[in-house]
Every structure is written in C-alpha cells, then in structure tokens.
C-alpha cells in the first residue's frame, strides 16, 4: 500500500520508518527540508520538500493514488486542512489527523476526521497507571473514550455476581472472565471468585466508578 506522512517531526519520522519496514510505499512531506534528517537511515521511501498546502506538493507526493494519509505536523490547523483536503478533494480512503490541543478536538470531529489525540489519550493513560493497581487497559477505541480493562476480583467480592458488582454503575459491560487460564463469556448471574480476571468494556467514568466499588467492598 502507498501512504503519505505529512510532517517529519519525531512522530512523522517514526511512523514513516514503521510503515516502510512493514513493506509499504511511503512518502514523507515537510516544508522544512532539514526535518528529513530525523528519518532513520534504514528508510528507503521518498521525501518531498515544499509548502504542504500547495496542490502540486501533495500531487508530487502521489496523493491521487495514495491508500492513506497521516497529517502529523505540530499544527492542529494545518493537520485539519490537509486531512480535509485529502478526503474531500482527493478522495484518499484512509485519513488520520493528529491533534495536540484537546480544546480543538470538537472542531476536528466536526469535519468527520479520524483523530489521534496524543495529549488527551496520554493524560488519561498516565492517570490510569498512577491510580490503578487492580486494573489495566488492554484495548483502546477511538481516543480512549471506550476501552477494555482487565480487573482482578478482590477477596471481598468472591461469591458475588456481575449484577451485584455493577448495581447502579453505568458505562460498563462485561466482556470476558478468565479463571485458571480459561476464559468464558460472563452472564449477569456468573459467580465471581477471588483472583478472577474480569475484562470490562467501559468509558473512563464507568471504570472509575467500578474501581471505586471494588475498593469499597460488597457492603458499600
């Protein structure tokens, strides 16, 4: 497949190398020619130097036949404009737009763009790692709005069920329960045992509430 990476900062350079190593054709575009020095020597794709918003620059990069484009510059506005043009004008099948400022996510989402928000996701993930002992995120959808978490059932909840655990808790759904190395699809009346690993699909607020309930114990 043929991909265009717009922006050759640290993320762009690393993304270009990863795509190249996976066997794809890669073109990196940047208006600062010195930025190409960040690309690893193993990279054998093309680089295009020029003003990113000029049609001839994107055309030299092969946008008319590109299978995907990632706009990963350090400017949210530039990423949005390039991504919108790639979709609306050149009909690129897959377009990814990097977002820095969380306050601008709404504007980007209004364009219907697929967004990767490193600031929002990074802050949320760091909070999870700092505050969560008995749980961890194993899958993230979108920009972390919904994730799959693994939670270890503590002693005080042994003998309870999912229905007991989720009483009054919204934003959570059971995905799988692993016991002694075997996984099952849990039902509402599945009895939990101490040490069970319960996989839960949840919003961030939903899993926070569920963690608090696990910490408080069954009498709460």
Image (spheres, rainbow, N blue to C red):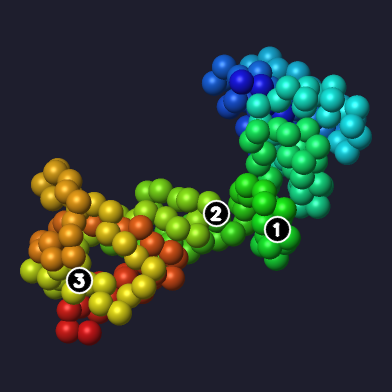
Separation of residues labelled 2 and 1 (CA atoms): 15 Å
- Regarding mark 2 in the picture, which secondary structure is present there? loop
In the picture, the disc for residue 64 is: none
Residue at the extreme bottom of the image, as rendered: 220
| Crowd band around label 1 with a 10 angstrom C-alpha radius: few (<14), some (14–19), many (20+) | few
The residue singled out by tag 2 in the image is 143
Residue at position x 18%, y 60% from top?
A: 187
- Regarding mark 3 in the picture, which secondary structure is present there? helix
Separation of residues labelled 2 and 3 (CA atoms): 28 Å
Q: Identify the mark nearer the N-term, 2 or 3.
A: 2
192 above or below 170?
A: above
Which callout, 2 or 1, points to the residue nearer the camera? Answer: 1
Query: Quick one: 64 or 56, which is closer to the camera?
Result: 64
Quadrant of res 130: bottom left
The residue singled out by tag 3 in the image is 163
Query: As drawn, is 139 to the left or to the right of 111?
Result: left
Query: Quick one: 116 or 34, which is closer to the camera?
Result: 116
What quarter of the picture does the C terminus occupy? bottom left
Q: Identify the mark nearer the N-term, 1 or 3.
A: 1
Separation of residues labelled 1 and 3 (CA atoms): 37 Å
The residue singled out by tag 1 in the image is 110
76 above or below 69?
A: below
Quadrant of res 56: top right
Query: Quick one: 32 or 62, which is closer to the camera?
Result: 62
What quarter of the picture does the N terminus occupy? top right
Query: As drawn, is 40 to the left or to the right of 33?
Result: left
């Amino acid at each position: 497949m043929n991909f265009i990476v717009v922006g050759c900062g640290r993320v762009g350079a690393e993304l270009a190398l990863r795509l190249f190593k996976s066997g794809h054709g890669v073109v990196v575009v940047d208006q600062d020619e010195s930025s190409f020095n960040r690309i690893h020597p193993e990279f054998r794709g093309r680089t295009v130097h020029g003003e990113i918003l000029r049609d001839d620059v994107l055309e030299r990069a092969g946008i008319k036949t590109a299978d995907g484009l990632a706009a990963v510059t350090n400017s949210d506005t530039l990423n949005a404009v390039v991504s919108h043009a790639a979709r609306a004008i050149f009909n690129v099948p897959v377009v990814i737009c990097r977002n820095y400022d969380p306050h601008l996510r709404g504007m980007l989402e209004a364009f219907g763009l697929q967004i990767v928000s490193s600031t929002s996701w990074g802050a949320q993930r760091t909070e999870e790692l700092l505050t969560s002992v008995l749980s961890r995120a194993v899958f993230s959808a979108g920009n972390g709005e919904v994730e799959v978490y693994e939670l270890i059932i503590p002693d005080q909840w042994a003998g309870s069920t999912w229905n007991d655990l989720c009483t009054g808790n919204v934003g959570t759904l059971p995905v799988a329960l692993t016991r002694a190395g075997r996984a099952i699809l849990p039902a509402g009346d599945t009895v939990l045992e101490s040490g069970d690993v319960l996989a839960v699909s949840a919003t961030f607020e939903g899993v926070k509430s569920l963690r608090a309930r696990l910490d408080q114990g069954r009498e709460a």
